[in-house]
Image (spheres, rainbow, N blue to C red):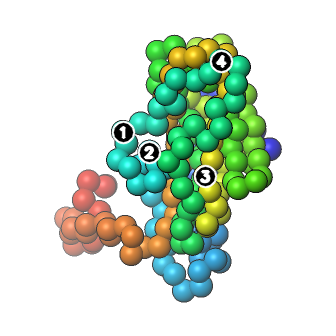
Amino acid sequence: MSTFVLGTQINPDRLAQLRVTLARDLTTIVQDANRGVNVVVRDLRPTDLNNGTLKGAVTTGALTADTLASDAYSSWTALTATQAVGIYGLANTTASPAVSEVQFIAGPYTLAITEIGMMYAANQTFGYFVDPITWLPTEHVNISYLSPTTQPDTVEWMGYIAEQDKLVAPPRLTANRDGKAVVAGHV
């Protein structure tokens, strides 16, 4: 079970702590499964959850009213042995949101069932999982939706993917005024 709270109900410091803890946990998961592998954690992109297909957003397409849309993005695939995914929040960017419930599944196991309709009733467009939803290496990421209507919906997932460092370009380091190496664009 994962507790879901409205975006305005979480303290920014608590959110920062949640994000740091999730990144550390995902790193540990991948390193424990692959001894000696260096791991990089980065923001989750829709492309990561669509079998590598370049996507700007994850849209459900037309839903069937009062019917569970199982694995709504049928192109989702299993994580590699050097990947783990964690979702700590969501934002619904549709003008008239349709999804009322989300189910998170890994293989045959249900990780969580979350009612998100309360988010719209409170005129919110985003919320957070106090206990993030996490998929382990080689698990299949499956997210299913329940909606009372047939209209399409767009849900943006806030999360991280941890993966072997050879799959991600390293940050470009530059020297600041003090001669220290820093990532360009960071203070």
**Location of residue 116 with respect to 148 vertically, above or below:** below
Counting residues from the N terminus, which is met first, the one under dot 2 or under dot 4? Answer: 2
In what element is the residue under mark 1? loop
- Badge 1 is on which residue? 56
Of the 4 image quadrants, the one containing the N terminus is: top right
N-term mark: 4 or 1:
1
Q: Residues within 10 Å of mark 2 (few under 14, many from 20)?
A: some
Between disc 2 and disc 4, the foreground one is 4
Q: Considering only order in the chain, which callout, 3 or 4, is on the residue closer to the N terminus?
A: 4
Kindly check if marks 4 and 1 are in contact, taking CB atoms under 8 A apart as contact.
Answer: no
Contact, mark 1 vs mark 3 (Cβ under 8 Å): no
Residue 30 screen position, x and y as percent: 59, 71
- Which of the image's four quarters has the C terminus? bottom left
Query: From this viewpoint, is residue 112 visible?
Result: yes
Q: State the residue position of label 4.
A: 65
Q: Amino acid at mark 1?
A: Gly
* Crowd tier of the residue under label 1, counting other residues whose Cα lies within 10 Å: few below 14, some 14–19, many 20 or above: few
Q: Are marks 1 and 2 in contact (CB under 8 Å)?
A: yes
Q: Amino acid at mark 3?
A: Val
Q: Nearer the viewer, mark 2 or mark 3?
A: 3
Q: Residue at x 54, y 44 (%)?
A: 74
Q: Amino acid at mark 2?
A: Pro
Mark 2 residue element: helix
For residue 107, what is the image quadrant?
bottom right
Instruction: Measure the C-alpha gap from mark 2 to mark 3.
Output: 12 Å
Rounded to the nearest angstrom, the CA distance separating label 2 from label 4 is 25 Å
Disc 2 target residue? 46
Residue sitting farthest toward the right: 1
Label at residue 141? 3
